[in-house]
Each structure stands twice: as structure tokens, then as C-alpha cells.
Amino acid sequence: MSIGSLSTADKAKLQHLINDGVQAMSDIANMKEGLKETVDAIAEELEIKKPVLNKAIRRSEEHTSELQSHLNLVCRL
């Protein structure tokens, strides 16, 4: 199926999805920049190396993802 064969309504839905995706990507970039600025400020204030803070954030994110995965698995059972 080509885009040209889509109905007007489906083309509008597709355009809306693309616009939402572009906005989400922009939001993610802004959040990453904000996190970087926050890490920089906290690292300076607490005299902690930036890589140490970034590693702690990544580990926390991984741990949260693991917990959510197990929770979802339990909920499915």
C-alpha cells in the first residue's frame, strides 16, 4: 500500500502521528539537555564527578525498568 492510496482521513491520522513523533523527539532532546544541566550543577555543588552521577541515574533507570518488567509479568499471570 502506498501513501497515495490512503484516504484523506488516514492521511490526516498519519500526519498527526508524525507530528506527535516529532514533538516527542523534541521533548526528549529538551529533557536530556535539562538533565545534563542539572547534573552539571549538582556535580559542582556537591563536588561529585559527573560520570558518577550519570552512572547512578542509569542504574536507577535500569532498576526501575526491571521492577516494571517483573510487575508486568506478575500482572499477566
Image: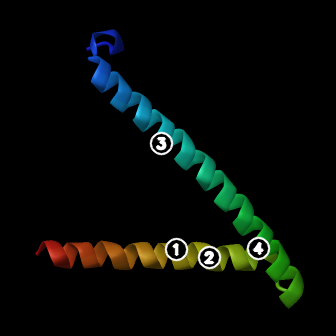
Of the residues under marks 4 and 3, which one precedes in the sequence? 3
Instruction: Judge the density around disc 3: few (<14), some (14-19), many (≥20) Cα neighbours within 10 Å.
Output: few
The amino acid pointed to by label 2 is Ile
Amino acid type indicated by mark 1: Glu
Q: Which residue is mark 2?
A: 57
* Residue ID for mark 4: 38
Label 4 crowd bin: few (<14), some (14–19), many (20+), radius 10 Å:
few
Q: What type is the residue that disc 3 sits on?
A: Asp
Q: Residues within 10 Å of mark 1 (few under 14, many from 20)?
A: few
Q: Quadrant of residue 43?
A: bottom right
Provide the residue designation for mark 1. 61
Quarter of the image holding residue 23? Answer: top right
Residue contact at pointers 2 and 1, CB within 8 angstroms: yes
Across and down, in percent, residue 62 comes to: 48, 73
Q: Residue furthest top?
A: 4
Dot in front, 3 or 2: 3
